[in-house]
Image (cartoon, rainbow, N blue to C red):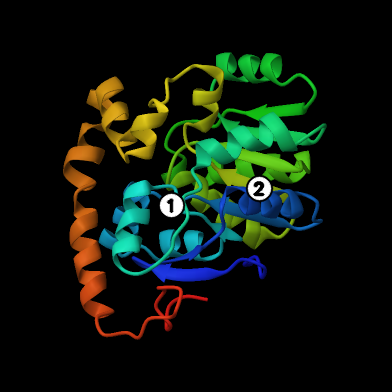
Amino acid sequence: MTAAYAPQCEFLGIRFDRLDPPAAVAAVLSLSTRSDFSYVVTPNVDHIVQLSSKDDPVLTMSYRDAALRLCDSRISSRLAYLSGIDLPVVTGSDLTADLLGQWLTREKLVVIGGDAKLHRALTLRYPLFDWQFYQPPMGVRHDAKARLDIAQFVEDAAADVVFFAIGAPQSEIVCAEILERGQARGVALCIGASLEFLTGAKTRAPLWMQRAGLEWLFRLGTEPRRLWRRYLVEGPKIFGIWRRWRKLNAGLPRAASGSSVSGCE
């Protein structure tokens, strides 16, 4: 299911929804009131590299079937700009902070992932919400029973918003399976470490580094053993992916807005 009200553009193999942050918040709030289930993905460089380098139809489907695909990377956004495409940045962390801090009121919320310390911190920081938490085992990506247990928890909870904090691509794949089962409601957000940033369990990069597209460097400095491969080995592949995309799309006519006529709305 795709949000019909979102202008879209294909870039680097993903059909992004070109919403700015306020429009993204409004779309999520609208989806949260529905009786059916939908989910939102926020592809960053790591996600694009995974999608481009792996012939994995399940992974591809999990991004394709999302209601919204929002660009969570200033690097991707700048590469889009150099390609004549206006691709707004809506990070999962900012979207989560805006929803919890300003727009959600007394909704029923579920968190998939995190630990007891994170759960307590969220309850204390946002006491007005009706929270439910589920902590799945490690290795969800390759554990069919664990994915089924998550799906059944989400279905039973019938929450307005579900925050998936079990990383990519596990979050996206489980959401796609929940959508296919057709028994849940509300909207799920695949938001990575966003809740950990909000509660102080992890420190987010200073605003100037975020705006400069250097948040990856800050995260590498804070968690080098865990993230060195993602940012130093896998991440740079985005430039080769972009060059190949540019070659395939060379010569396409440009709209007055600067977007490719054939790929953007």
> What is the crowding at mark 2: few (fewer than 14 residues within 10 Å), some, or many (at least 20)?
many
> What is the crowding at mark 1: few (fewer than 14 residues within 10 Å), some, or many (at least 20)?
many
Residue sitting nearer the eye, 82 or 33: 82
Q: Which residue in the structure is indicated by mark 2?
A: 25
Can you say whether 57 is above or below 166 in the image?
Answer: below
Q: Residue at x 72, y 28 (%)?
A: 132
Identify the mark nearer the N-term, 2 or 1. Answer: 2
Question: Can you say which quadrant of the picture contains the N terminus?
Answer: bottom right
Q: Position of residue 201 (x, y in %)?
A: 48, 17
> Disc 2 on helix, strand or loop?
helix
Q: Residue at x 34, y 62 (%)?
A: 80
Can you say whether 253 is above or below 201 in the image?
Answer: below
Give the amino acid type for the residue marked by disc 2 in the picture.
Val
Q: Which mark identifies residue 43?
A: 1
Q: Position of residue 2 (x, y in %)?
A: 62, 67
The CA span between labels 2 and 1 is: 17 Å
**Quadrant in the picture for residue 82:** bottom left
Q: Is residue 185 visible?
A: no
Q: Position of residue 8 (x, y in %)?
A: 52, 69
> Disc 1 on helix, strand or loop?
loop
Q: Which mark identifies residue 96?
A: none
